[in-house]
Amino acid sequence: MRAVLLLFLFCSIWSSVSFAKESYARIITSAGTIKIRFLTSTAPKTVDNFIKLSKGEQRFVDKEGKKAMRPFYNGLVIHRAHPELGIFSGCQWGTGRGWPGYYLFDEIHDGVTFDAPGKVAMAKLSASDNRFGSQFFITTTAAPRLNKKYTIFAEVESGMDVVKKIASTPTDAMMMPKSPITINSIEVFEQ
């Protein structure tokens, strides 16, 4: 009888344990797909903002100065690419100077660093600023010089070959790809 009671108690506890799912996104570009895993525990506000912009659930100010609410990243270009720096996107104007009409503040976490390629972080209008909006970059190499300067909110799970292919594309003097590479869509999911 005691064994049955213990088994019942164990099963009751086990069935109440929930296994947390992780959040991911597929960044579908004209050059291929990049899958990223969000770092929700260390950059929750940043992740929430990126997901809402991706899904069209975050109000922003469009290029014409009007309030809009649609999937923000769809159709935006990769506005900078460099084999040793990475790829940059998230600017409505395609210049690296655009923003969504609001800012968030850094969520820099000591335990999350640019110790390997494939870190996804928010870009800023200037390196000395602690605010960001919609622009992000994906590194192609370890970049310890960026530690404690940018909010890392995701890591590449697959598609690093796509990141490197985009980063190696011929560019102009401003590091903009000569042949436009676009973000077709971003699909957010859990698993």
Image: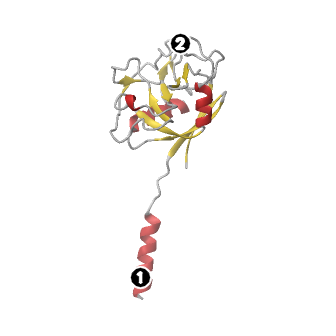
Q: Can residue 150 be seen in this view?
A: no
Would you say 95 lies left or right of 148 here? Answer: right
Q: Which colour scheme is used?
A: secondary structure
Q: Is mark 2 on a helix, strand or loop?
A: loop
Position of residue 93 relative to residue 72, above or below, is above
Q: Which amino acid does label 2 sit on?
A: Met
- Marks 2 and 1, how far apart at CA: 70 Å
Spot occupied by residue 39 in the image (x, y as percentages of width and height)? 44, 41
Spot occupied by residue 20 in the image (x, y as percentages of width and height)? 46, 53
Position of residue 82 relative to residue 139, above or below, is above
Q: What residue type is labelled 1?
A: Leu
- Count every numbered label the image shows and give the total: 2
Spot occupied by residue 6 in the image (x, y as percentages of width and height)? 41, 80
Position of residue 76 relative to residue 9, above or below, is above
The tag on residue 174 is 2
Which numbered disc, 2 or 1, marks the residue closer to the eye? 2
Please state which of residues 133 and 78 is positioned toward the viewer in this rendering: 78
Of the 4 image quadrants, the one containing the N terminus is: bottom left
